[in-house]
Amino acid sequence: MPAIATDGQLLHQAQAYLKSQYGEDTVRMEILRNEVEDGHGTLIVECTVRIGGSHSNWRKTFTFKNGEVTSMTWRHLG
C-alpha cells in the first residue's frame, strides 16, 4: 500500500479485515474520523455488518501500522 492511502483503500482494508477475522460481510461503512498518516494511525467508522443472515450496527476503530490493519475495537450500536 502506498504511504498515503485514500479513504477508499482504508475502507477496503477494514472490510477485508472484518471478513477474514470475523466472517462479517460489510453492508455499509461510513468514516467518522480518519487519523491514518503514512500508514499509521486509527480509522473510526460506523458500519452495518451481516453475519449468518443477521444485520447489526457498530462503531469500530481500526488501528493501522505500516499500511495494514493490526487490531480493532468496537462498540455495538444496536
Image (spheres, helix red, strand yellow):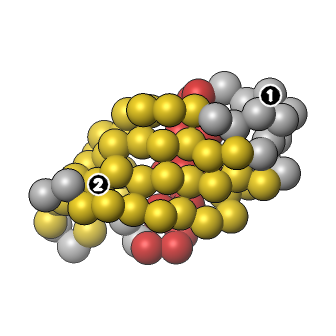
User: Which amino acid, by three-letter code, is at mark 1?
Assistant: Ile
The total of numbered circles placed on residues is 2
Residue 4, quarter of picture: top right
Location of residue 17 in the rendering, given as x and y in whole percent from the top left corner? 56, 61
Q: Which mark is residue 28?
A: none
Location of residue 66 in the rendering, given as x and y in whole percent from the top left corner? 84, 51
Q: Which mark is residue 58?
A: 2
Residue 7 or 40: which is nearer the viewer? 40
SS at badge 1: loop
Image quadrant occupied by the N terminus: top right
Location of residue 52 in the rendering, given as x and y in whole percent from the top left corner? 21, 73
Asked if residue 2 can be seen in this view, the reply is: no
Vertical position of residue 6 compared to residue 70: above or below: above
Residue occupied by mark 1: 4
Residue 43, quarter of picture: top right
For marks 1 and 2, give the CA distance: 26 Å
Query: Neighbour class for label 1 at 10 Å: few (<14), some, many (≥20)?
Result: few
Please name the residue shown 49% across and 52% down the image. Answer: 61
Location of residue 56 in the rendering, given as x and y in whole percent from the top left corner? 19, 59
Q: Is residue 51 left or right of residue 29?
A: left
Asked if residue 20 can be seen in this view, the reply is: yes
**Marks 1 and 2 in Cβ contact (< 8 Å):** no
Please name the residue shown 50% across and 32% down the image. Answer: 33
Residue 1 or 47: which is nearer the viewer? 47
Vertical position of residue 14 compared to residue 11: above or below: below
Query: Neighbour class for label 2 at 10 Å: few (<14), some, many (≥20)?
Result: some
Tell me which numbered mark, 1 or 2, is placed earlier along the sequence: 1
